[in-house]
Image (spheres, grey):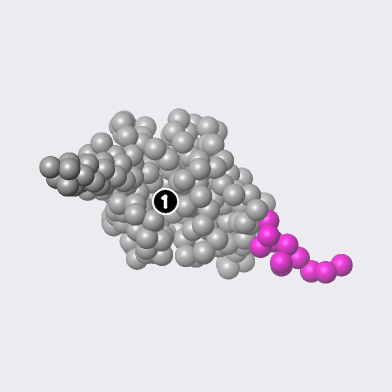
Amino acid sequence: MKKLSAFLFITLISIGSVAQAECVILLHGLARSERSMKKIEKRLKKMDYKVVNASYPSRNYSIRALAKLAIEPALKICPRYTKVNFVTHSLGGILVRQYLADHVIEDLNRVVMLGPPNKGSEVVDKLGKFPGFKLINGDAGRQLGTGHLSVPNRLGDANFDLGVIAGSKSINLILSSIISGEDDGKVAVSNTKIDGMKDHVVMPVSHTFMMTDKDVINQVVYYLKNGQFSKGIPQKKRERKTPRQ
């Protein structure tokens, strides 16, 4: 009888642990796929998160349509009554803001955005007028500027637990010449910020490859666990790259 009681106790503890496992939904950026988020997915799975690496046709619909198309199926995969987190790249962060402007996620916990154009991108302002831009980037791409068509600038402040990672390294000097101030090759550091965010950190990574950077992934994990970033990681990397005087 004692053995049976012990077995039931262990079983109940195990079930409780599974029920408490948090879910993390990954959302890739414009003209990318779920493959771009694979390194983050692998790391989070090792930490026993339930990970949903969502794929969506980013070039085929508007931001509002994509938000529903990408997020609602992902939420259904997350176990019931568990905390829901998001880790997003670029456009993916705007989809979360759009979805939360239209819906409530009751079990929402934390959101980490990588390189989000929270105030739009000047690259879209400059290149969005060219005929080929819409063909390549779709309706959502044209909505990511800073002008009157900008969806991010209409979505308001963050009223959820948000940490933002911005990049300060560019691999496209032509695009960077269009952008004011420090940038990641696509988005100005200043335009990644949004009122209401809980934390913000700048790291020496490019917009295109920040999702695969080991230190960025470490910051993602740290924020999901602690609700803030570890400020030492990007500072140390910058110091290594500073020439000796």
Q: Position of residue 44 (x, y in %)?
A: 39, 57
Characterize the local packing of mark 1: few (<14), some (14-19) or many (20 or more) Cα atoms within 10 angstroms: many
**For the magenta stretch, what is the residue range?**
235-245
Q: Quadrant of the N terminus?
A: top left
Find numbered disc 1 in the image and state the secondary structure of the residue it sits on.
strand
Q: Is residue 98 left or right of residue 207?
A: left
Q: Is residue 108 rendered magenta in the image?
A: no
Q: Position of residue 46 (x, y in %)?
A: 37, 60
**Residue 162 located left or right of residue 18:** right
Q: Give the total number of marks visible in the rendering.
A: 1
Q: 238 or 14: nearer the eye?
A: 14
- Vertical placement of residue 114 versus 215, above or below: above
Q: Quadrant of residue 8?
A: top left
Q: Amino acid at mark 1?
A: Thr
Q: Is residue 66 left or right of residue 76?
A: right
**Residue positioned most to the front:** 2
Which residue occupies 62% across, 66% down?
173
Question: What is the quadrant of the C terminus in the image?
Answer: bottom right
The residue that appears at 33% across and 45% down in the rendered structure is: 22
Residue 207 position within the rendered picture, expressed as x and y whole percent measured from the top left? 52, 60
Q: Residue at x 76, y 65 (%)?
A: 242
Q: Is residue 35 above or below residue 138?
A: below
Q: Nearer the viewer, residue 230 or 92?
A: 230
**Residue at 41%, 61% in the rendered image:** 43
Query: x and y percent of residue 130 in the render?
Result: 45, 58
Q: Which residue is mark 1?
A: 88
Q: What is the quadrant of residue 12 in the picture? A: top left
Examine the rendering and report whether any part of residue 121 can be seen.
no
